[in-house]
């Protein structure tokens, strides 16, 4: 096979920014077969496989890319899914630039191989063309409960069912998928695709019970009394943080978590064909600059807002969102108000009418290495907005820690685990994903789910 020595990736076709900022269809349109094979030919198939060091779930990356280059897409799919149960999702939402692609040798002098785009292509091709193979799994008679059907929980459940366990996933909401279903917008991650990936796990025999709030409907101790020999907690970080400034209780102020959940689960993404069930004004301010803030801003634009601002207290260099998300937001007309910090939300008759901000300048670096913003005295001014979305992070819901005696947690609420096994301080209970780390990435949560499944298997096999 002839190597493609181009310094740049094969470009991904995308919707035009001025069209897509009015619809919820996927922004990136995916590679054709020819594009995928051309991009795969850029891989040097390095002996030491540095890309794999950057993958939290250890996908054999050069192996699958070699198969794509040969045009054997089903073989590529088999290789990916030997380690990753959700490739169509990871190909879309993983921060590849900091992980596999960040370690790619081709990235030293040019652009790295487009590993994420190739993973997405392979998964989509398989979904469109393959008939699922039947798996004959021998049951071992042992039951495991999984709390939460997000990426950590679904991955852990999928790994355990293949090892012969009877697995039941308990999901608090009426729809499985966790953050994949309620948090990530349709234009980045189509919901029918999430449903198909979850269906794949259900076909293996995983049972999913929705509308069960562990800590309210049933406790972890009660699950263990019911015969579950181990429990994996993958309940995410669904408790929003706020600014604690005057006016946060006004109508028209959302947490990003509430805003995106309403849009996804109440199907606001069908707008403009159907009226939106989410009230969005003409001028929207989103506070924060991570991926969730970009999602909220771009969603508000699609729901008809004329002006959408990202308000962030640091500068362009410190933006925590993925470069791709920032680029897409700017293309779609999102206005960035950097070095501005909100100090009050103003209102009239109970509704938001504006947000008061104070300009910032960057001082010395803080403990994380980012330069600390300092207020510029007397620089306060008001941004004219009628909707405010707060996107400054989330913490784990306290329900599980409050109802599970013997479970050690961090001061900020994260469950404490052993790093290698995801084992908690409570016998038979394991945890992983955002409930341990705080809000992080889908792939890191999946890595934790895999690690926990291996440890649970070792624990129950030794009993």
Image (cartoon, helix red, strand yellow):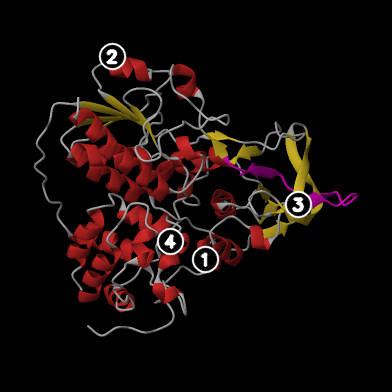
The spot of residue 449 in percent (x, y) is 34, 41
Question: How much space separates mark 3 and mark 2, taking CA atoms?
Answer: 51 Å
- First in sequence, mark 3 or 4: give its number: 4
Quadrant (top left/top right/bottom left/bottom right) for the C terminus? top left
Question: Please, is residue 356 above or below residue 65 in the view?
Answer: above
Separation of marks 3 and 4 at Cα, in angstroms: 29 Å
Which residue, given by chain and number where applicable, does mark 3 sit on?
373
Q: Please state the horizontal and vertical placement of residue 52, each as a whole percent of the image.
A: 34, 61
**Secondary structure state at the residue bearing disc 2:** helix
Compute the Cα span from label 1 to label 2. Answer: 55 Å
Residue 60 visible in this rendered orientation of the protein: yes
Mark 3 or 1: in front is 3
**Is residue 392 inside the magenta stretch?**
yes
Query: Residues in magenta?
Result: 373-393
Q: Residue 453 at x, y = what percent?
A: 28, 38
Crowdedness near tag 4: few (<14), some (14–19) or many (≥20) residues, C-alpha within 10 Å: many
Mark 1 — residue?
Answer: 19
Q: Which residue is denoted by mark 2 in the rendering?
A: 225
Q: Which residue is mark 4?
A: 96
Residue at 47% from the left image edge and 23% from the top image edge: 401
Q: Is 353 left or right of 441, judged from the image as shown? A: right
């Amino acid at each position: 096979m002839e190597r493609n020595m181009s310094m740049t990736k094969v470009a991904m076709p995308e919707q035009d920014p001025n069209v897509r900022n009015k619809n919820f269809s996927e922004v990136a349109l995916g590679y054709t077969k020819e594009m995928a094979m051309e991009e795969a030919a850029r891989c040097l198939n390095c002996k030491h496989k540095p890309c794999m060091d950057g993958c939290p779930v250890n996908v054999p990356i050069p192996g699958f890319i070699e198969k794509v280059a040969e045009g054997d897409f089903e073989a590529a799919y088999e290789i990916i899914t030997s380690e990753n149960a959700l490739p169509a999702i990871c190909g879309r939402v993983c921060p590849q630039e900091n992980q596999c692609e960040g370690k790619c040798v081709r990235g030293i002098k040019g652009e790295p191989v487009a590993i994420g785009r190739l993973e997405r292509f392979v998964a989509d091709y398989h979904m469109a063309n393959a008939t699922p193979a039947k798996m004959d799994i021998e049951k071992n008679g042992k039951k495991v409960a999984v709390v939460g059907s997000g990426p950590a929980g679904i991955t852990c459940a999928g790994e355990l069912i293949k090892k012969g366990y009877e697995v039941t996933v308990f999901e608090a909401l009426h729809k499985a998928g966790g953050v994949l279903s309620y948090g990530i917008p349709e234009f980045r991650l189509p919901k029918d695709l999430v449903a198909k990936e979850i269906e794949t796990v259900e076909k293996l025999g995983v049972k999913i019970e929705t509308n069960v709030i562990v800590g309210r409907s049933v406790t972890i101790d009660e699950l263990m009394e019911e015969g579950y020999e181990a429990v994996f907690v993958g309940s995410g970080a669904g408790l929003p943080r706020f600014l604690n400034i005057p006016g946060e209780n006004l109508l028209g102020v959302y947490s990003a978590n509430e805003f995106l959940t309403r849009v996804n689960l109440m199907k606001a993404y069908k707008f403009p064909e159907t009226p939106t069930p989410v009230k969005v004004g003409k001028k929207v301010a989103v506070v924060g600059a991570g991926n969730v803030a970009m999602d909220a801003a771009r969603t508000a634009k699609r729901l008809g807002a004329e002006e959408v601002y990202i308000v962030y207290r640091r500068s362009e260099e410190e933006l925590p969102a993925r470069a791709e998300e920032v680029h897409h937001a700017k293309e779609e007309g999102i206005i960035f108000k950097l070095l501005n910090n909100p100090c009050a939300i103003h209102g009239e008759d109970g509704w938001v009418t504006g947000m008061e901000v104070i300009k910032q300048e960057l001082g010395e670096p803080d403990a994380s290495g980012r330069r600390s913003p300092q207020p510029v005295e007397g620089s306060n001014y008001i941004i004219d907005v009628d909707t405010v979305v707060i996107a400054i992070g989330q913490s784990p819901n306290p329900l599980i820690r409050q109802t599970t005696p013997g479970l050690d947690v961090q001061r900020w609420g994260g469950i404490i685990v052993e790093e290698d096994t995801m084992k908690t301080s409570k016998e038979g209970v394991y945890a992983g994903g955002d409930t341990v780390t705080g809000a992080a990435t889908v792939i890191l949560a999946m890595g934790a789910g895999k690690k926990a499944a291996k440890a649970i298997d070792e624990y129950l096999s030794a009993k």
